[in-house]
Image (cartoon, rainbow, N blue to C red):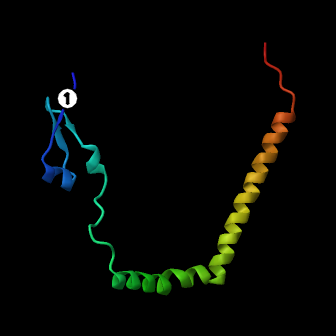
Amino acid sequence: MESTLIQTSNQKDQGIPCQKEGGIQGRSPSSFYQQAPSQPTSPRREAEQEKELEETIFPKIQDPKIQKDAMDNVLNMAKTLMEFKDKEEQRMRQPHFPKK
């Protein structure tokens, strides 16, 4: 027996859980997604957001110390992966026989 969702359009827009027949709580699939704004971002707001990025994020990205730390992290991860790969290859080369 298939139950149907009972939900008003107001509940759906606000992401309010809907009531299934039989008293079981659930959510309609559309309530999991946020509604996109009907108006696109204004050019003025886009300019403000870009300015904020230029003032906060970009200087951090261009900081040589942060770049060096990031590169060190990448190199350490690569080294760890290579060590793991070498250990795995050694393990596979060793003969192993099933125990009787």
Question: Is residue 15 found left or right of 57 in the rendered image?
Answer: left
Look at 81% across and 36% down and name the residue there. Answer: 91
| Residue holding disc 1 | 3
Question: Is residue 22 found left or right of 59 in the rendered image?
Answer: left
Question: Is residue 70 found left or right of 35 in the rendered image?
Answer: right
On screen, 83 above or below 37?
above
The image shows residue 79 at horizontal and vertical percentages of: 76, 58
On screen, 37 above or below 22?
below
On screen, 95 above or below 62?
above
The image shows residue 57 at horizontal and vertical percentages of: 51, 80
Q: Quadrant of residue 14?
A: bottom left
Number of numbered discs on residues: 1
On screen, 27 above or below 81?
above
Q: Nearer the viewer, residue 100 or 40?
A: 40
Look at 20% across and 45% down and name the residue there. Answer: 17
Q: Nearer the viewer, residue 41 or 77?
A: 41
The image shows residue 48 at horizontal and vertical percentages of: 38, 85
Image quadrant occupied by the C terminus? top right
Residue at the limit of the structure toward the top, as seen here: 100
Look at 78% across and 52% down and name the residue there. Answer: 82
Q: Nearer the viewer, residue 78 or 40?
A: 40
Which amino acid does the dot numbered 1 rest on?
Answer: Ser
Question: Is residue 18 found left or right of 33 in the rendered image?
Answer: left
